[in-house]
Amino acid sequence: MVTLDEVILFIHILGATIWVGGTLSLGIVAAAIGPMLRDRPALYSQVMSRVARSLGWTMWFALIVTILTGLYNLTWFLPVLSWSAILSFPWLEAKIFLVFFLVLASGVHSFVLGPSLRKRAESHPPAAGIARWRRWDRGISILSLALTLGVLFAAVMLAN
């Protein structure tokens, strides 16, 4: 017999898999086409925007589902949800901390820097300072990837 907890855990892991897979896929695409299109910022921006839009909403939906199921899964560890109870599990505390900053960094990347960079790259001629915006965008992307991997590591440690 399959329990509700097992179904929710499966959905949690599926959502995390979609988020991590999408993050890695976008990173691989950016790394693969970046050098080829270095001198064509508008085309690079257009390609990355299309790829990101095709994966983006699925990834964000998966992340939201993962967070919601994760909140449900907290009840396995904490009979009463309180900060003092959370602090008694250092890997749980780390995971919550990392997820918070992951959502923040990914939101800045997806909804602020990405669209702004696309508009700057597609203006004719490309807007001044685009290289600086690209560096910020790349930095936030790398930070999001590091936070994603940190969440996975904290989850593994928590499971032990």
Image (tube, helix red, strand yellow):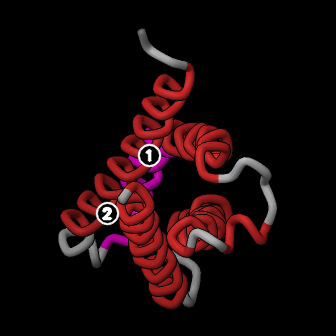
Question: In the image, is residue 1 above or below residue 52?
Answer: above
Q: Is 159 inside the magenta-drawn segment?
A: no
Q: Looking at the picture, tell me which residue is in the foreground, 61 or 55.
A: 61
Residue 116 in sight here: no
Q: Position of residue 8 (x, y in %)?
A: 54, 29
- Residue placed at 49% from the left, 23% from the top? 7
- Residue placed at 18% from the left, 69% from the top? 36
Q: Looking at the picture, tell me which residue is in the foreground, 52 or 6.
A: 6
**Which structural element holds mark 1?**
helix
Nearest-to-viewer mark from 1 and 2:
1
Q: Is 47 inside the magenta-drawn segment?
A: yes
Question: In the image, is residue 78 above or below residue 118?
Answer: above
Q: Quadrant of residue 101?
A: bottom right
Disc 1 to disc 2, C-alpha distance: 16 Å
**Which structural element holds mark 2?**
helix
Task: Give the residue pinned by disc 1.
Answer: 16
Quadrant in the picture for the C terminus: bottom left
Quadrant in the picture for the N terminus: top left
Kindly identify the amino acid type of the residue bearing the numbered disc 2: Gly
- Tell me if 42 is positioned left or right of 95 in this view: left
Q: Which mark is residue 27?
A: 2
- Tell me if 118 is positioned left or right of 13 in this view: right
Question: In the image, is residue 7 above or below residue 50?
Answer: above
Q: Residues within 10 Å of mark 1 (few under 14, many from 20)?
A: many
Q: Quadrant of residue 4?
A: top right
The single residue placed furthest to the top in the displayed view is 1
Question: In the image, is residue 55 above or below residue 138?
Answer: above
Q: Position of residue 27 (x, y in %)?
A: 31, 63
Q: Looking at the picture, tell me which residue is in the foreground, 127 or 80.
A: 80
Residue 4 in sight here: yes
Q: Which residues are magenta?
A: 40-56
- Tell me if 30 is positioned left or right of 86 in this view: left
